[in-house]
Image (tube, rainbow, N blue to C red):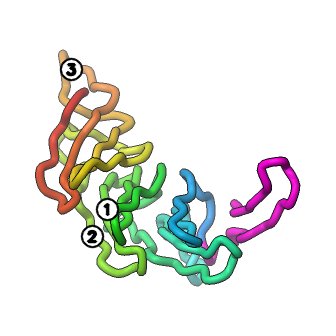
Amino acid sequence: GVIFSINTDGTGYKDILDFNGTNGFAPYGSLLLSGNVLYGMTSGYNVNQIVSHGNVFSINTDGSGFINLHNFNGNDGQNPRGDLTLSGNVLYGMTSADGTIFSINIDGTGFNNLFVFNSPNFINGRYPQGSLAISGNVLYGTTYSGGPMANNYGVDGTIFSINTDGSGFTNLHN
């Protein structure tokens, strides 16, 4: 993967960052811009020949100041998908495999798993994907599959809400 910039008229292409494994690989989702800083996620990360399960990063728009904010280790989620959502100085996102909803401060501190999609029979959903929307202190999102069983058939995903502190998870629709 690569992060690049280009003028709206197609001129001025600039390669800002090439992902090479040690700084992440296989980025998914869009970049989030706040001031002159871009935030994003990759679905893989290679540290000392050991492949991990993705990362959250920041980089300045001029290509300087790359910071690896968090490496997922499989116990705290893996393979983040979708976009990050920013509220104040806190980023919110989801991992698809071993599905989680997480928060992390923009400086990389305070990583917190807000919710893990591991309920029996994945009644709360499975494989969260897409992006989180925020309204006040409530996050809204979707899962790719899971939900309550009906006549022994699985439901194809859920729409959910959860408070930004991790409380109040609600399955809104299957």
Residue 43 seen in the current view: no
Residue under pointer 1: 102
Is 93 placed above or below 171 here?
A: below
- Between 121 and 55, the one lying in front of the other is 55
Quarter of the image for the C terminus: give it. top left
Image height of 138 relative to 104, above or below: above
Q: Which residues are magenta?
A: 1-23
Main secondary structure found in the magenta portion? loop
Q: Amino acid at mark 2?
A: Asn
Q: For label 2, count other residues whose C-alpha is less than 10 Å away and answer few (under 14), some (14-19) or many (20+).
A: some
Residue 131 percent across, percent down from the top left = 42, 46
Looking at the figure, which quarter contains the N terminus? bottom right
Q: Which mark is first along the chain, 3 or 2? A: 2
Q: Secondary structure at mark 3?
A: loop
- The amino acid marked with disc number 3 is Asn
**For residue 152, which numbered disc appears in the image?**
3
Instruction: Give the residue drawn at x 42%, y 69%.
Output: 72
Residue 10 lies in the magenta-colored region? yes
Mark 3 crowdedness (10 Å alpha carbons): few <14, some 14-19, many ≥20: few
Q: Are marks 1 and 2 in contact (CB under 8 Å)?
A: yes
Tell me the residue that label 2 is attached to.
Answer: 112
Asked whether residue 66 is drawn in magenta, I would say no
